Image (tube, rainbow, N blue to C red):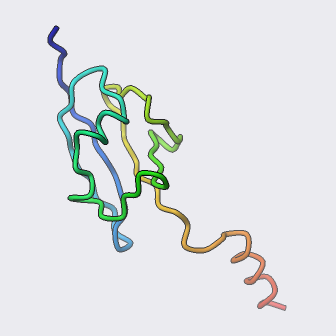
Amino acid sequence: MSYPNFEIDIYYIKSKKLYKKKYLIRENLTLGYFLKTTNIKNFYSDYNKNETKFGVFGKIISNDYIFKKGDRIEIYQQALKDPKKSRKRKILNKK
C-alpha cells in the first residue's frame, strides 16, 4: 500500500537561535519510527534518547504520536536554570 507524502517542520534552538528543518515524510508515520530512521544528531547534537522531549504546538508528544499534515514539531531543551529559583533570587536581590 502506498502512502501519500507531506512535509513537516521541525523547530529547535541552538546557541540561542531558532532553527527550522523540513522533512518529507509519509502519512501514518510515528515520532518513534521517525527517530529510528532519521539521524537527528546530524542537526541536533544535543539529542538524548532518554531525555529529549518533543512537542506539537506546545504540547509534549510520545513516541507513538502519528504526524499530521501541518504539524509543527518542536524539540525541547532542558531548562538551564530552575525558573522558580531564578524568580526568588530576583525578588531577594531587590530588597
Question: Which residue is pictured at 49% across the width and 37% down the height?
Answer: 61
Asked if residue 95 lies left or right of residue 85, the reply is right
Question: Which residue is pictured at 20% across the width and 40% down the height?
Answer: 23
Which picture quadrant has residue 1? top left
Q: Where is residue 68 drawn, in percent x and y?
A: 35, 25
Question: Which residue is pictured at 55% across the width and 67% down the height?
Answer: 79
Q: Is residue 18 above or below residue 40?
A: below
* Count of residue discs: 0
Q: Is residue 47 above or below residue 91?
A: above
Q: Where is residue 22 drawn, in percent x and y?
A: 21, 44
Q: Where is residue 64 drawn, in percent x and y?
A: 44, 29
Q: Is residue 89 above or below residue 54?
A: below
Rendered-image quadrant of the C terminus:
bottom right
Q: Where is residue 80 drawn, in percent x and y?
A: 54, 73
Q: Residue furthest top?
A: 1
Asked if residue 39 lies left or right of residue 13, the reply is left
Viewer-side residue, 67 vs 52: 52
Asked if residue 25 lies left or right of residue 94, the reply is left
Question: Which residue is pictured at 26% across the width and 52% down the height?
Answer: 40
Q: Residue furthest left?
A: 2
Asked if residue 73 lies left or right of residue 4, the reply is right
